[in-house]
Image (cartoon, helix red, strand yellow):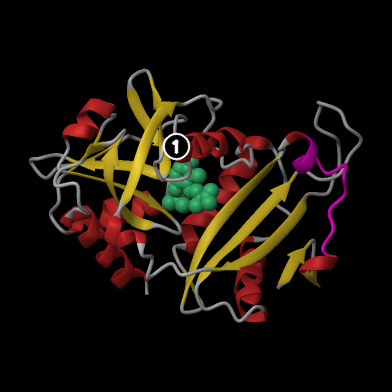
Amino acid sequence: RTVYLNGDWLPETEAKVSVFDRGFLFADAIYEVTAVIGGKLIDYAGHGARLRRSLEELAIPCPLSQEALLAVHREIVRRNALEEGLIYLQISRGVADRDFAFPKGAEPTLVLFTQAKPVLDNPRTKTGLSIATMPDWRWERRDIKTVQLLYPSMAKMEAMRRGADDAWLVEDGFVTEGSAATAHIVTKDGVLVTRPLSNAILHGITRASILDLARAEGIAVDERPFTVAQAKEAAEAFITSATNFAMPVVSIDEAPIGSGRPGPIAARLRDLYIADRL
Ligand code: PDD
């Protein structure tokens, strides 16, 4: 693979970041994941906008203009002949002597790499995911897409230890989101229920697109928090994320959701999203 590092295009084995990089020492960095289908960027405008917001919240200067960042995304697809998969982008505050205070005048470190993987024909779409719930022990600024991913990683490992595919995180009795995806349910009355935006969750780009498509299809959308019990009683459950689009959830803590098979509304929204974005 050819990766991008601070203005250079390098073979992945030659791309090196300092041990003093604050991304490495403090997780002082933000990231974005953009899906690529047929060599095309999916929902890039949203990812670009959220990237700038994350940087502003942390007072990390954006190393490139909006146009230049888009050009780098397009160029990395071209250089790697990427047909299907994702682009990972990370910006850290940069390299400085270890100190909790932000350094003055550090140059941000900007890295992009690609990962080829099947996104359209994901076999999990047919089987759906099993979910295990556990407490949300992340910090309270989950709206900022930082690389502090240790707890979500531990949560996924715990879910897998329990025989599930992934975790949904719960705070004060309400589902916040998945380890790396937005959580949604569809009630028996056909209402799509999803947690409203706040600092408790990442403002999912796929979430916004799927909600728009749902409303345009005449599916009622209710943005309110839901409990694990309400999720277990739902007709359907699903997650959304850049690389999952809409992906059905078929069980929560071993309780089957609805028929226990992928639901029609999740499948419909997934198809609509793909048709709309390609
Ligand atoms: N995860 N919530 C969390 C905690 C996430 O990490 C993600 C994305 C989402 C969905 O956001 P979006 O629709 O903008 O991808 C929600 C990415 C894909 C990841 O960490 O790999």
Q: Position of residue 128 (x, y in %)?
A: 30, 53
Q: Residue at x 38, y 70 (%)?
A: 120
In the picture, the quarter occupied by the N terminus is bottom right
Confirm whether residue 64 shows in the render: no
Q: Amino acid at mark 1?
A: Ala
Q: Residue at x 31, y 60 (%)?
A: 125
Q: Quarter-wise, where is residue 86 in the image?
A: bottom right
Q: Please tell me which residue lies in front, 56 or 137.
A: 137
Count of marks placed on residues: 1
In this image, 28 relative to 150: left or right? right
Q: Is residue 147 above or below residue 12?
A: above
Say which element carries label 1.
helix
Q: Residue furthest left?
A: 189
Residue carrying label 1:
159
In the picture, the quarter occupied by the C terminus is bottom left
Magenta region: which residues?
15-25
